[in-house]
Amino acid sequence: MSVSDEKEKSIFRYLSEYDRRIIYFLLFIVVVGPLISPIAMPISVSPDSKQYYDVLRTLGSNDIVLTVLDTEFSGYMELQSGVIASTRMIIEKESKMAVAISHPEATIIPDILFGALKDLMDAHHYTYGDSYLVLGYIYQNEASVASSAEDFQGFVRQDWQGRPIKGTFLEQVRSWKDISLIVSHTTGILSGSVMNHFALRGTRMIVNCIGGMIPGQKTYLNTGILKAVLPAMRGGAELESLIGIRGLGTKAMDAFTLGHYMLIAFIIIGNIGYFGYARPRAQKARTGG
Amino acid sequence: MPPLFSVPGVVQGRFLGLLCVVALFLSVIYYMRRKKSLYIRKVAGLDAIEDAVGRATEMRKPAVCSFGIGGFGYSTVFGLAILSYVAELSAKMGTRLIVPTGGGTASMVVRPVAQDIVRQAYIAAGREDMYKDEDIPFFSGQQYAYIGGYVGVLQRTRPAVVVMVGSHASETLNITETSNAVGAIVISSATSVSYAAFLTCSSDYCLIGEEGPAAGAYLSQDPSQRASIGSQDLFKWVALILIVVGLAAYNVGSDVIIRLLQS
Amino acid sequence: MSAFFKSREVILTAAGLAFVATFVPYFVTIPELSVISTKLVTITALVNAFTLALAVHSQFMRGMYFVRRRSRGWILKAYMMVTIVLMVIFATMGQDKGPYNWVMLAIVNPLSSVNYGILAFYMASTCARAFRARNMKALLFLAAGFIVLFYQAPLTGSIFPGIEPVALYLTDTFAMAITRTFTMSVTLGAIIFGARVLMGKQPQVLGLGGE
Amino acid sequence: MPDIIELSIVVVGAFLAMCMFSTLYGKSSPMYALAEESYLGFATGLTIVVNVLYLYNTGIVGIRAGDWVLSFGFLLGFMIVVRIFPKYSYISRIPIAITLGSGLGLGLRTTIFTGFLDQIRGTIIQLFSGSAKTLLYQWTIAICVLFTLPFFLYTVELKGPLGWVAKIGEYLMYISFGASFAQTFMGRLGLFVGFMQYYTVPDWKIPILVLSMIIVLALIVALDKTNLLARLTPEE
């Protein structure tokens, strides 16, 4: 074997067997870099996001929307652009909204969410009690979802602060039939239960879900149980683009693009290493060479 | 499309569902009473458990087995059935078994059952002294605190085998990748395509689809119990026939099968 | 009396009745049965909340085990037990503001986010390791993954709009259809498994393994 | 500029987060253990709070409102807690059996529709009308379902024509796995990007994040090089 062969082999070997911490380090860099110093790359809008946007556009001021924050705080990080953009649309349509929560970590999200939309809420006179209510952490388990779908008044007696819901717009909600639309922002904690007890009975339901849930949710979209699925952070950015704002989703798209391209680069590198080193070596071992 | 028919006393659109569940239950009874042993395809992931626990024994390293973070749904319960098998093997071979629990508020009620399973396995093998409550740690009712504790245990105890089955969710990859990094054999289960996609890559063996729920029957020594797997296949044939007939009918203009399914 | 609680038949009957009480009302048009079902699931949720006592008791016992033995790092276990108590005290001081809110924002939420966000790293390393064209199955896996990854980078859609139909074809047909088969397989497995449990063929899961 | 509370939230959060990220270094460390135990302790506290509130809001408030049936929840709950005394642990089997039975009932009553009947119904689609794209989609879905279902047959030997069908089904499954993997990666990357965004917006958080990263990385490398890492990591 010549010296150049030796050298070539060692490069392929490195490409095949590099330390996985290199990937970790580079992923940190390609994500944090564009967040600190944005590049503003362009994005396109997918049909899924358009469908989700179209469902929200049908809302009117007499509709009652149940927004379910079915997420841990960590999941909210991925969903937040979609959550803010969806809520923005509900407020613009002046529909009534109740916010239910299914994870204790999510109890601080309404504050952050309505804080971010304060100006818009003031402009539309969207006030607590008259236009929206935060019910708090009411969905601890499937049992609670089932109870609220069957006997809403028996299940929800007060809001997050302990104030009775009597006399508010929620007084007219008796069961699943009286909810116009459910918007579930979900990492999958209880969205299946919400779907089973509400959407399966006939309540219209749309879902803003994390990336890992998309294929599963599309199945329900295809069978008509769900009316639209917003695909994670990218969907959030697309919804922002459809309603014409530049929010957190849009700002995160550079890091998103670079993260994907970095992974593609590593796949190519891995395959070069595999065909240049690992595969010939395995073949050699098989043939006893 | 209106349903094909409705039955008085049954909620409209739910009769066929009820009928299916009843038929499935009856078919289990039928297959189990038939006492005829049935051909069952090998499931590599389940067959590998015994060797993997054996490897842990040889290496004098612990085995780790978890059954998920959910309440008493079917996925947690089949996780418990596999835990029972792993516990029996560990007790028989004298291997330390660690069972991380918690991860969800609903999972707390499952924990006592897991304790009973492990304790009884060690008692049955005559090694009660090896059972320790400390080896069934509770890592809070929060999913990611649980995973923090789980990963910590994996890094510090460096087990030889990790059997992660049942109602696990996105935390599966934290477990498989850490297990992989500490050199453990990983046997996992996936009940959805997205989890199957990365678990087949990051685990040594992955039980896909119904392989998890069917594990209890598959691992049983009793042929009549194993035969209950036949009812699953029976209904897959029913599904296949309904799809083929439904497609044919629908494409010549009849929606009878769709309306039947809505009945 | 203890024989009653230990009886296998009693335990199986209790499980069977609870199953019927939750399962049947969903199908029949008798509203009273629905009320029974709703109450029962609420009761079981209350029972679950009680098991917290067992779990926390066990967590303290485990912590004390390390502290008593003065195992390396025992101080962290002691710290962990203190934080449990602190969190309960903080919660009684009010959840809107104050120390409870601080702990949620400074500790619980960031650490929850890390353990979730870290999956990006694990997926990247799994992907770099597994996406290698070793055989036909791996090649198909790689090709589909590559196209969808490439499409998902938001910039790609603007530069190569032609990739969108291919990627959407893969995700909206293959991924969706296989999810459908998977779901059917799991559902059948789950129902059969449920039947086996209720028939007492998986006694371990009811705590009857040693009987 | 932020107030001291906000600043402390970001400083502590960023530092502990980086300690948690230190698990990527591949070795157990005291920094990771610190983050782990902090999270575990506070999260358990949170679990206690959540459950006690649930017992109060659903149980006590419900009973006070005349819903006396809920007192059975307390009775069964006490029966479970008796397990603290191992001698009487058998008493807990009844509440466990009831919880398990109702859990299975609750799950199975809807899954037969969402997981089976609706999936069959969703596969019965038009195969001969619609645009070329619609036809391609519909045929692919129908073929994928029909070819992969036999792959899940366990009591039939997969050989001959059925074997071929199952083999093709398996290939189709791997295409879907690839697509699904990529979609999941997008989600996980989104989580990480979202998290990092929390510590980079507004600008004053950036130095805190960068400094935390440098400190934790320097600490772990230094401890590793001086062989202190193993000696300082807690025992299990």
Image (cartoon, coloured by chain):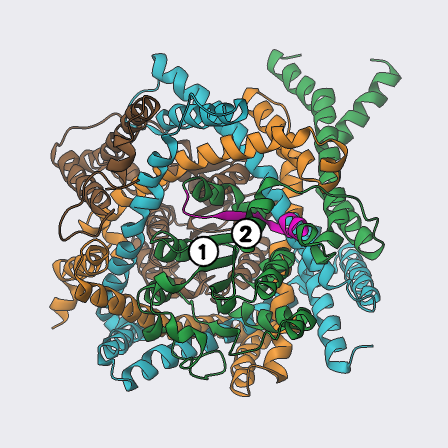
Chain colours: A green, B brown, C orange, D cyan
Neighbor class of circle 2 (other Cα within 10 Å; few <14, some 14-19, many 20+) is many
Relative horizontal placement of residue B55, taking residue D211 as reference (left or right): left
Please say if the residues under marks 2 and 1 sit with CB atoms less than 8 Å apart: yes
Neighbor class of circle 1 (other Cα within 10 Å; few <14, some 14-19, many 20+) is many
Mark 2 or mark 1, which has the lower sequence index? Answer: 1
How far apart are the alpha carbons under marks 2 and 1? 9 Å
At label 1, the amino acid type is Ser
Give me the chain letter of mark 1: A
Q: Where is residue A123 drawn, in percent x and y?
A: 67, 72
Where is mark 1, residue-wise? A191
- Is residue A234 in the magenta section? yes
Residue located at (47% from left, 43% from top): A216
Q: Where is residue A15 drawn, in percent x and y?
A: 76, 30
Q: Where is residue D91 drawn, in percent x and y?
A: 22, 70
Which residue in the rendered view is the most extreme toward the front? A61
Where is mark 2, residue-wise? A209
Seen in the picture, residue B253 relative to A253 is either above or below; the reply is above
Which residue in the rendered view is the most extreme toward the right? A3
Which region is colored magenta? A224-239
Front residue (pair A7, A120)? A120
Front residue (pair C199, B182)? C199
Evaluate whether residue A227 shows in this view.
yes
At label 2, the amino acid type is Cys
Evaluate whether residue B215 shows in this view.
no
Residue located at (64% from left, 15% from top): A283
Q: Where is residue A56 drawn, in percent x and y?
A: 55, 55
Q: Quadrant of the C terminus of chain A?
A: top right
Q: Secondary structure at mark 1?
A: helix
Where residue D208 sits, quadrant-wise, is bottom right
